[in-house]
Image (cartoon, grey):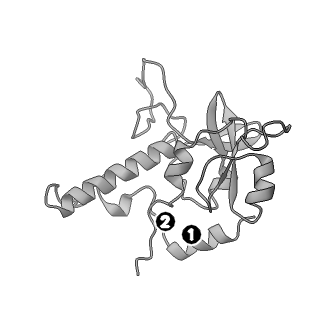
Amino acid sequence: MDRTMLVPPWLEQLLTTSFFRVCRTHGDAARSESNMFCLDCSGDAFCFYCRSSRHKDHQVIQIRRSSYHDVVRVSEVQKVLDITGVQTYVINSARVMFLNERPQPKAGSKGASHICETCGRSLLDPVRFCSLGCKLKFSLAIRLNKSEKNQGTGTNCGNNKWECENHDPFRLVMECNFINKSKHLS
């Protein structure tokens, strides 16, 4: 059995979900913005009331906003995902990371000492990616390259860290550790 798990099945859905819409079911309620995501169901975003009624015993993370962009608290996502190499920020006393790539000024990252390996955004720390989305894009590109190699259209990896599966940014060391982390969240 393969003891590794590359990308959790819910991650792509999380990154493409639209958050902060009014809940269709609880639109008249006070806390009806859809800012929750269920890792077990991998469906659409939902509100506080939907969590209580439909996702009571599921693994749920709350999405927040920072400068009109979706973020997630590091303390929530690191329990279920390897976030190594993704830039984090402290916002309102909580360490967070952006879900997706953010637009940047045309000037780019000239003179920046650290840049995102996927989109080129300037980074504050010596990490590889500006967001979970950029880390996923990079990981998918690696897999596509490996797939082409397996079909005889690519080149052998050798020790090239950009193409080698041992350097896949979403590689989780042990599938059983990932599952154990996931099952014990409240």
Q: Residue at x 33, y 62 (%)?
A: 165
Q: Secondary structure at mark 2?
A: loop
- Quadrant of residue 168 within the rendered picture: bottom left
Q: Seen in the image, is 132 located left or right of residue 37?
A: left
Q: Amino acid at mark 1?
A: Phe
Q: Residue at x 20, y 63 (%)?
A: 150
Spot occupied by residue 85 in the image (x, y as percentages of width and height): 50, 49
Spot occupied by residue 173 in the image (x, y as percentages of width and height): 48, 69
Q: Amino acid at mark 2?
A: Leu
Q: How far apart are the alpha carbons under marks 2 and 1? A: 7 Å
In contact (CB < 8 Å): disc 2 and disc 1: yes
- Quadrant of residue 116 within the rendered picture: top left
**Extreme residue toward the right, this view:** 30
Q: Seen in the image, is 17 located left or right of residue 161?
A: right
**Extreme residue toward the front, this view:** 25
Give the crowd class for mark 2: few <14, some 14-19, many >=20 residues within 10 Å: some
Question: Looking at the image, which is closer to me, 26 or 158?
Answer: 26
Spot occupied by residue 161 in the image (x, y as percentages of width and height): 31, 55
Q: Which mark is residue 178?
A: 1
Q: Seen in the image, is 47 located left or right of residue 105?
A: right
In the rendered image, the vertical position of residue 20 relative to residue 2, given as above or below: above
Spot occupied by residue 140 in the image (x, y as percentages of width and height): 37, 52
**Extreme residue toward the left, this view:** 152
User: What residue is disc 2 on?
Assistant: 172
Residue 93 visible to the viewer: yes
The quarter of the picture where the N terminus appears is bottom left
Q: Secondary structure at mark 1?
A: helix
In the rendered image, the vertical position of residue 69 relative to residue 47, given as above or below: above
In the rendered image, the vertical position of residue 177 relative to residue 92, given as above or below: below
